[in-house]
Image (spheres, grey):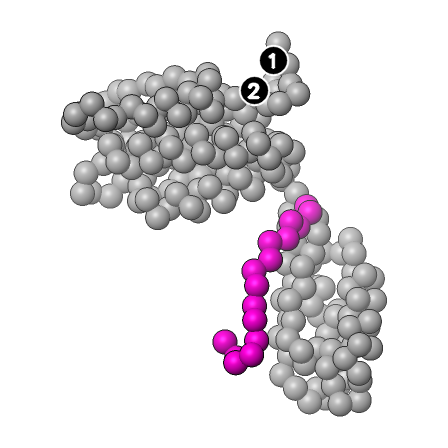
Amino acid sequence: MAAGWAYREVVVDVDPAAKVVLYTDGLIDRRDLALEEGLERLLAAASSERGRPVEPVCRELINALVPSEAADDIALLAMERLRVRDEAFRLRMPAEPAELRRMRRALGGWLRGIGVELEDTNDLVLACAEACSNAIRHAYGPSAGTVDIEARRDDGAVEVVVRDFGRWRQRRGQDGGRGLALIEALAPSMRIERSERGTVVTMRRTLRGSVSV
C-alpha cells in the first residue's frame, strides 16, 4: 500500500443483465486528453453498449476511446451478470470444509437470481451449509468424498437436497444433534433418508408471502 493512501472495501449489488467494466488508467488518461473528458467519453461509449452482448464490448470501447497509437499500456475487462433462467440448481463439491464458502456463494446467487427475498435466501443457505457440514464431518473418513446439492423452486417454496455417498459414523457423547435442530428451525419440512448408498437430507421452506396449496 502506498504511503499516505487509505483504501476501504465497498460491496455493490449488480443487477441481473448489468455490465461491469474494469480498466487501467491508460484508457482515459492521455497527454492530449484531460482525465475528466476521458471519463465522460468512457461513460458515453459504455452507455451506447447497453443491451449488447458482453463479448464485443471491450473491442468497441477500445475502438471508441483509444487512438491508433496508444502511449500507455491498456487493460480492459467487461463482465455481465447473467439472469438466472433455470428453475433448478445443481452443484457437486468436494467434501472439504473449505468448499462450503463456494457453495454458499453459488446457492445464494441462484436464490437471489430467481427472486427469493434476502431473509429466505440467508436461511436457506445457512440450512444447506449446516447439512453439508454434517455430511463432511460424519459421512467420510480420511478418504476423499463428494457432496451433491440440488435445489428447485416449487409452489411458493424452495426445496434443497443435500446428498452424500458415505457411511455416517456414530456420534460420540451427547453433544450432537444441534445442527439438525438448526436446520429444522430454518427449513421446517425436513426429512433424512439413510441407505447403503449414502444419506439424503431434504429441506423445504415456504417463501415469505407465499401460500402453499
Q: Secondary structure at mark 2?
A: strand
Residue at 72% from the left image edge and 88% from the top image edge = 69
For residue 106, side relative to residue 30 (left or right): left
> Which is more toward the observer, 136 or 127?
127
> Which is more toward the observer, 43 or 9?
9
The circle drawn on residue 206 is 2
Say few, some or many: other residues with alpha carbon within 10 Å of mark 2 (under 14 / 14 to 19 / 20 or more). some
The circle drawn on residue 121 is none
Rendering quarter of residue 190: top left
Residue ID for mark 1:
212
| Residue segment shown in magenta | 1-16
Residue at 26% from the left image edge and 20% from the top image edge = 195
Q: Quadrant of the C terminus?
A: top right
- x, y (%) of residue 41? 82, 72
Is mark 1 in CB contact (under 8 Å) with mark 2?
A: yes
Extreme residue toward the top, this view: 213
For residue 105, side relative to residue 212 (left or right): left
- x, y (%) of residue 164? 32, 31
- x, y (%) of residue 204? 49, 21
Residue at 77% from the left image edge and 64% from the top image edge = 46
Question: In the rendered image of this protein, does residue 89 appear above or below residue 72?
Answer: above
Is 15 included in the stretch rendered in magenta? yes
For residue 62, side relative to residue 4 (left or right): right
What's the residue type where badge 2 is placed? Thr
What's the residue type where badge 1 is placed? Ser
Question: In the rendered image of this protein, does residue 63 appear above or below residue 207?
Answer: below
